[in-house]
Structure formats: structure tokens, C-alpha cells
């Protein structure tokens, strides 16, 4: 998602761009469903509009009008209503395969963008003038700048000798789709349970996408039990606010780890998306952060390329790193902190939680700030996001 978005943003600015992807053309045209529905924040929608890909995914996008953050057993819950900030939805839910399909369909139309499918980088060298990527089939590519947007286990990051900080959450995120008897009305529900966060995200066709986190061992046994037992445990956690719910399709599971690259840049190389930072999915912000990397980098590169300046030199890279590390750090601290704060019964932390929930609901400016945060509209925003204001 991040690599294609960046490539589109660059190509649409006239910057000649090459995308190297391991998957085949057929797999990119028809991505497989992997049980993930992506919460695309309002700011990310603007980035995807700028990339010319939003139109292709809009028919599959379900608007989020309200967000309810609930802690079981606590007297408070926080309710974010989109009308408090205007009429725009807070974000949209789009299935992962629909996002990829729309991005690829837009990418093949861009003249300045070449896609090498079924291709992998075997070696990376850089010097003062540019970089060279040698592919596994022996082909060579020369460029002013390379970007590693090859995910959490980035091979290009390793080739550049960039290490990572990693933490195993010892949690499993289970995902599935449910058809619901009662209308969800665009409500995204996030429940913080002692065993881990549980989210029900509104999808088209009055369905919801579930992201249900449990400690690893319990999660693994829930993935093994039959559908009836799985659904019984799910209903217990979810409650009955959507009436009778039925499972659609398969269940999927993702072991959760946090990962951050020690550096976001190396000579002639920038990291973007999960290659730079892979965070807990509890706030649905991982790819939103990555899309802001893409927009920021495209903006910096296009500005220099237009002036005929070197679009991959150290000055550009260090501006990119300063800009993006700050945004990523804020999100890492928030998601990591929330996961810890809510999966404990330690009394002082429980009291802090309740105080926090009460304060958020009672204090309009705090609530609006958090809503704008969830919408991806806080901090130093790339131009493609900031052009119009929410
Ligand atoms: C259960 C779950 C739910 C989530 N929900 C949300 C959500 O609601 N909202 C949100 O913002 N985020 C969410 N996320 C996070 C989101 O999925 C990731 O942040 C996102 O997939 C990262 O995108 P990316 O493009 O950086 O990397 P990836 O999606 O990992 O893509 C990497 C690409 O690089 C290619 N590649 C890899 N290695 C090579 C190689 N050596 N050579 C060539 N190509 C290569 C891959 O084929 C792939 O196409 C969720 C994550 C999980 C686990």
C-alpha cells in the first residue's frame, strides 16, 4: 500500500519512478483477501485522492461516522461523533485487497511509473552520486534515491545495514467478517478488555470487520476450536448491540510485534511504511502513518526534482527523517501505551484510565484534538493533506 502510493504520488508529479515488487502482475491485479479491513483516516483519504487511487476504492469504502471507545467494567466511555467537526466521515473502512486493487489499477495508468513485477533486490550500493540496485535475476537499476517500502521484514533495510528495535507483544490479533442483524450506522466500536482490545469496524452490506486481540496461547486455541465455540467467545466479548451476528468467510490470525528501524535513512535510501515502523493494530493507524511517510517523501523529492536538484542527497534525507520520526514516535507511544494501560488491572492504572475517559468526554478541546488525531489531521501535515482543511 505504501510503496504503490508513494510511486503514484511521485509519478503524478512527473518524477520518473520504478516500482520493484516481488508479487506477480496477476497477484497485484487480483490481490487475495487476508481478513484485514483497513481503517483509512480522513487525512489518508486525501493522500489516496492525490495519488489518483481513491476513486477506485470509494465504491468499496464504508464511512465511519462515530467511534465509541469502551472499557468493560468502567463507568465511562468515549464517544466521537463526526458532526462535532463538520460533515465529513472520520474515516472509511476498506478491505485490504480493495485498497491494493485500486492502487495497482491507478499505477498501471501512470506514464512516469514503471512496474517490475516478480522482481527482488539482491544487493544495494550507494555513493555520492546515486545508488545501484542489483536484482536477483542479475538486472541492474540506477537511481538517485531508493525507498524501502517492503514491509516489516524489509530486505532492503537489512542490505543497508539498518538495525531494528523489536518487541513481541505475545498477543494474537484475530480477524473475521460478520454479517449483522441490526444496522451498524457507521459506528466503529473499540472495546478495551483485560485480555486485549476488541474492535468491530463498519463495512458495506451491514457487515463488520472484527480485530480481536488475545494473549498468544488463548488466541491460538480460539483459532483451533470449531466455529460454534469461536462465535460463542466472540459474542461474549462483543455484546449484542448489533443483534444476531454470523461469520462470513474464514478467520485469520496475526501474531503481533512492534518494530521500529533504528534509522529511517541511509545514504541514498529512505524507509517508509512498515519497513520503518510496524505498530500495534489497536488504533488502526499503521498504514495511515505509512501513507503520511509516502506523502512527505513525495513532496520533498518532487520539490527538488522540479528545480533540477539532486532528489536523493543527504539534506533531503535528513529533512525526511526529522519530519517522519516525530510523527511515528507519537503514534508508537500512543498505541504501545494504550495496549499496556488497558491490559492491566493494577489499581492506580485503572484509576488513571477512568480519570482519562471522564476528562476526554468532559473537555471538548481534548476530545476534538483526539478526533483530529484519529483522522490523521494533526502535526506537520504533507501538502496533499493540508491543502483543504477539515
Ligand atoms: C490485523 C491487522 C489489522 C490492521 N488494521 C489496520 C488498519 O485498520 N489501519 C491501518 O492503518 N493499518 C492497519 N494495519 C497495519 C497495516 O496492515 C500495515 O501497516 C500495512 O500493511 C503496511 O503497509 P506497507 O505497504 O508498509 O507494507 P506491506 O503491506 O508489508 O507491503 C510490502 C510490500 O513489499 C513487497 N515485498 C516485500 N519484500 C520484498 C522484496 N524483498 N522484494 C520486492 N518486494 C517485496 C510485498 O510483496 C508487499 O507488496 C493492520 C495490521 C494488522 C496485522
Image (spheres, helix red, strand yellow):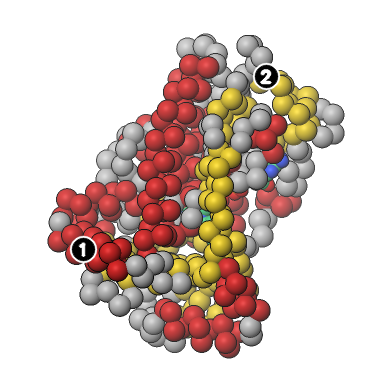
Q: Secondary structure at mark 2?
A: strand
Q: Quadrant of the C terminus?
A: top left
Label drawn at residue 355: 1
Residue 376: x, y in percent? Answer: 36, 46
Residue 175: x, y in percent? Answer: 55, 68
Does the image show residue 63? yes
Residue 266: x, y in percent? Answer: 59, 25
* Quarter location, residue 249: bottom right
Report the front residue among 206 and 359. Answer: 359
Name of the residue lying farthest toward the right: 137
* Quarter location, residue 117: top right
* Category of crowding for the residue at label 2, using alpha-carbon neighbours closer than 10 angstroms: few (below 14), some (14–19), many (at least 20): some
Residue for point 48% across, 55% down: 280
Residue 364: x, y in percent? Answer: 15, 55
* Category of crowding for the residue at label 1, using alpha-carbon neighbours closer than 10 angstroms: few (below 14), some (14–19), many (at least 20): few
Label drawn at residue 63: none
Residue for point 53% across, 59% down: 169
- Looking at the picture, does residue 330 appear above or below residue 37? above
Does the image show residue 59? no
Horizontally, residue 383 falls left or right of residue 169, namely left
- Looking at the picture, does residue 369 appear above or below residue 262? below
Residue for point 41% across, 72% down: 194
Report the front residue among 162 and 54. Answer: 162
Report the front residue among 388 and 253. Answer: 253
Q: Secondary structure at mark 1?
A: helix
Q: How far apart are the two marked residues, 1 and 2, measured between alpha carbons?
A: 52 Å
- Looking at the picture, does residue 210 appear above or below residue 19? below
The residue to which callout 2 is attached is 126
Residue for point 76% across, 29% down: 123
* Label 1, ligand 1: CB separation under 8 Å: no
Question: Which is nearer the N-term, disc 1 or disc 2?
Answer: 2
- Looking at the picture, does residue 154 appear above or below residue 13? below
Amino acid at each position: 500500500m505504501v510503496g504503490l502510493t508513494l510511486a503514484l504520488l511521485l509519478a503524478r508529479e512527473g518524477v520518473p519512478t520504478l516500482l520493484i515488487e516481488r508479487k506477480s502482475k496477476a497477484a497485484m491485479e487480483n490481490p487475495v483477501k487476508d481478513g484485514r479491513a483497513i481503517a483509512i483516516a480522513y487525512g489518508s483519504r486525501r493522500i489516496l485522492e492525490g495519488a489518483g487511487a481513491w476513486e477506485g476504492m470509494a465504491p468499496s469504502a464504508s464511512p465511519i461516522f462515530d467511534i465509541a471507545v469502551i472499557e468493560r467494567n468502567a463507568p465511562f466511555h468515549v464517544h466521537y461523533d463526526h458532526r462535532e467537526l463538520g460533515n465529513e466521515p472520520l474515516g472509511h473502512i476498506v478491505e485490504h485487497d480493495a485498497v491494493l486493487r485500486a492502487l495497482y489499477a491507478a499505477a498501471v495508468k501512470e506514464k512516469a511509473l514503471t512496474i517490475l513485477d516478480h522482481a527482488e533486490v539482491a544487493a544495494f550500493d550507494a555513493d555520492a552520486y546515486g545508488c545501484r540496485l542489483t536484482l536477483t535475476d542479475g538486472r541492474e537499476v540506477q537511481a538517485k534515491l531508493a525507498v524501502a517500502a517492503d514491509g516489516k521484514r524489509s530486505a532492503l533495510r537489512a542490505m543497508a545495514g539498518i538495525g531494528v528495535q523489536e518487541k513481541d507483544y505475545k498477543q494474537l490479533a484475530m480477524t473475521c467478517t460478520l454479517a449483522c442483524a441490526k444496522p451498524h450506522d457507521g459506528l466503529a466500536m473499540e472495546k478495551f478488555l483485560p485480555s486485549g482490545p476488541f474492535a468491530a469496524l463498519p463495512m458495506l452490506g451491514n457487515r463488520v470487520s472484527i480485530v480481536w486481540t488475545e494473549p498468544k496461547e488463548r488466541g491460538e486455541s480460539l483459532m483451533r476450536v470449531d466455529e460454534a465455540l469461536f462465535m460463542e467467545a466472540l459474542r461474549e466479548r462483543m455484546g449484542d448491540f448489533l443483534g444476531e451476528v454470523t461469520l462470513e468467510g474464514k478467520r485469520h490470525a496475526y501474531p503481533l510485534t512492534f518494530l521500529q528501524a533504528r534509522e529511517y535513512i541511509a545514504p541514498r535510501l529512505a524507509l517508509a511504511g512498515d519497513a520503518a515502523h510496524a505498530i500495534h493494530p489497536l488504533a488502526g493507524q499503521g498504514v495511515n502513518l505509512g501513507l503520511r511517510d509516502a506523502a512527505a517523501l513525495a513532496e520533498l523529492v518532487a520539490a527538488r526534482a522540479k528545480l533540477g536538484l539532486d532528489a536523493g542527497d543527504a539534506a533531503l534525507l535528513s529533512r525526511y527523517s526529522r519530519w517522519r520520526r516525530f510523527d511515528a514516535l507519537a503514534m508508537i507511544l500512543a498505541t504501545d501505551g494504550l495496549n499496556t494501560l488497558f491490559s492491566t488491572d493494577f489499581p492506580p492504572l485503572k484509576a488513571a484510565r477512568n480519570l482519562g475517559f471522564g476528562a476526554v468526554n468532559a473537555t471538548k478541546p481534548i476530545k476534538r484534538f483526539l478526533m483530529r488525531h484519529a483522522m490523521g489531521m494533526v502535526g506537520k501535515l504533507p501538502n496533499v493533506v493540508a491543502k483543504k482543511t477539515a
